Amino acid sequence: MAGSIIGERFVAISFGESHGRCVGIVVDGCPAGLPLAESDIQGLLDLRKPGQSVVTTQRKEEDKVEIISGVFNSRTTGAPICMLIWNKDSDSRSYETIKTIPRPGHADYPAMVKYGGFADYRGGGRFSGRLTATLVMAGAVAGKLLKETLGIETVAYTTEIGTVKADNITPANIATRYGNDVRCPDPVAAEKMKDAILQARKDRDSLGGVIECVTSSLPVGLGEPIFASLESDLSKALFSIPAVKAVEFGSGFAGSKKRGSENNDVYMLKGGRVVTKTNNAGGILGGLSNGMPLAIRLAFKPAASIAKTQETLDVSKSAQASLEVPGRHDPCVVPRAPPVVECVVSMVLADHAIRAGLIPPVLK
């Protein structure tokens, strides 16, 4: 399967480049009858779009979605849903001066080799974080489908920026996660995170961080082991988000330091429902959902585009070169990533719910 396609039954095909005419996505396999309007998608796009605060890139894109096909009389028809966003504030001039000078931390050089010099290098082209807008469009459809049919909801939020870590995260303040610039539920930590990002920008540098994602009301048994287990497909999809360098479920790396007696989740009955006392498994056992909340953590590397002078190579001259990356860039990509993570998880869960027969081809 080509690299721009994901999913088996809920299929998404991403297209576009950072500084091209538009970015967009085609969703095939969404059941007919789902109420859907551009406003359902726009809300999540607005949470991701650039230029919202002092801690994000100042590129000003409206990111206004247009639904081109697959919706009639405000409901999905069962036909492919094509959605796109026109790029309106791209400035490619600075990229012409560095097209033979690969930026450290970017895909410039491997893309140059793989595509024989024909890849669109402007703004990172196909490898830009701009393409996460296409994931949000597809994921917004998937999220609405999951909520309307199965009551499944996914939330993501920032837990770490650089060395600043949130330690006061509760269900109540998770609901307020989009109320601050860094999307952290802990208001005290959020202010420290913002200060850390602004200091990194002042130093002409960048920061990374960690996002946590939790999905509730999952049915038992989603997943198709062994190569399409729920963990396998979620990991594959989440690593499609630029800057994600690690994904863990449940206790993750911390669980590797425990004994089995500490890490095993004990079964019990609660309100007539089988649950576990702890959730070290993160809601997945043997590649199948076990009915507990799906708990995922993602590590994002520091933003690769920094204003600080770096050493690199000018491949046209086969000589070392100094580079200050031009353009408008995020000093930290984490604050804009929670809606992207929510949407990518929703895409995978919708695909598996349809594969499991839990969502019919026509909604009534």
Image (cartoon, grey):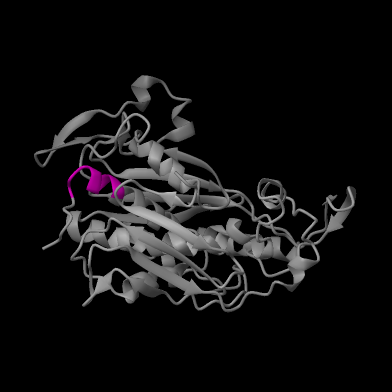
Tell me, yes or no, whether the highlighted magenta stretch contains residue 354. yes
In the image, taking residue 64 as reference, residue 9 lies left or right, namely left
Overall secondary structure of the magenta section: helix
Q: Give the total number of marks visible in the rendering.
A: 0
Quarter of the image with the N terminus is: top left
Would you place residue 163 above or below residue 42 in this image?
Answer: above
Residue in view at x 23 percent, y 40 percent: 291
The answer to whether residue 284 is seen in the rendering is yes
Q: Nearer the viewer, residue 300 or 355?
A: 355
The quarter of the picture where residue 126 lies is bottom right
Q: Which residues are magenta?
A: 351-358
- In x, y percent, where is residue 168? 43, 53
The quarter of the picture where residue 221 lies is top left
Residue in view at x 29 percent, y 37 percent: 223
Residue in view at x 80 percent, y 55 percent: 101
Q: Nearer the viewer, residue 66 or 304?
A: 66
- In x, y percent, where is residue 274? 16, 35
In the image, taking residue 269 as reference, residue 6 lies left or right, namely right
Tell me, yes or no, whether the highlighted magenta stretch contains residue 99. no
The quarter of the picture where residue 250 lies is top left
Residue in view at x 46 percent, y 62 percent: 134
The answer to whether residue 173 is seen in the rendering is no
In the image, taking residue 149 as reference, residue 263 lies left or right, namely right
Would you place residue 34 above or below residue 168 in this image?
Answer: below
In the image, taking residue 7 as reference, residue 334 lies left or right, namely right
